[in-house]
Image: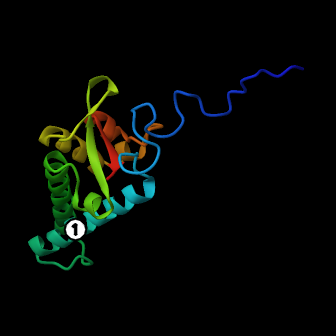
Amino acid sequence: MASSAQSGAGPTEEFRYPGNRLGLPEEGPGSVAGWGRRFAALFADWLVAGLIASAVVGKPIWAGGNDFNTAQLVIFFAMSAILTGLAGATIGHRLLGLRLLKTKAGGQGYAAQVGLLGGAIRSLLLCLVLPAVIFDKEHRGLHDLAAGTIVVRR
């Protein structure tokens, strides 16, 4: 049996690494952020929201309860929407050297600012959890696809 010259098992020119199709570098500043950094940034943001919620409801963070949990989720949403919309990064993103870019129509080029509407859409879907765990080859979750954003390294 003869084998073909192209096995189809290796990377194609179209997709060689996350961000290739979007014109981003493979490594270094501007490359697509890895899962470890993104998860650590999310954890840091959730912790900050918990500390703020603890001060708002007057309970320690470990006490929990419905009022604390609701306050933490609302604070996380507001903090994430405002900071990503206006500053392009949450507190966790800043701590871990990440930023959020807005992709332009057709996937060619990027805008520096996501905007409040894009930040709100992304944060709302992030709070629902499921859209954040369904992602594509570019490491963009459904929340990033809906908002037209991508998380990259600083």
Q: Is residue 31 above or below residue 37?
A: above
Say which quarter of the image contains residue 49.
Answer: bottom left
Query: Seen in the image, is 67 located left or right of residue 106?
Result: left
* Figure label count: 1
Specify the color scheme. rainbow
Q: Residue at x 23, y 76 (%)?
A: 61
Label 1 sits on what residue type? Val
Q: Residue at x 45, y 48 (%)?
A: 27
Query: Seen in the image, is 36 located left or right of residue 122?
Result: right
Q: Is residue 16 above or below residue 129?
A: above
**Residue 146, image x, y percentages:** 29, 34
Q: Residue at x 18, y 61 (%)?
A: 70
**Residue 76, image x, y percentages:** 20, 58
The residue under label 1 is 48
**Who is closer to the viewer here, 111 or 131?**
111
**Residue 130, image x, y percentages:** 37, 45
**Who is closer to the viewer here, 10 or 117?**
10
Say which quarter of the image contains residue 120.
Answer: top left
Q: Identify the image quadrant of the N terminus.
A: top right
Q: Residue at x 39, y 40 (%)?
A: 140
Question: Is disc 1 placed on a helix, strand or loop?
Answer: helix
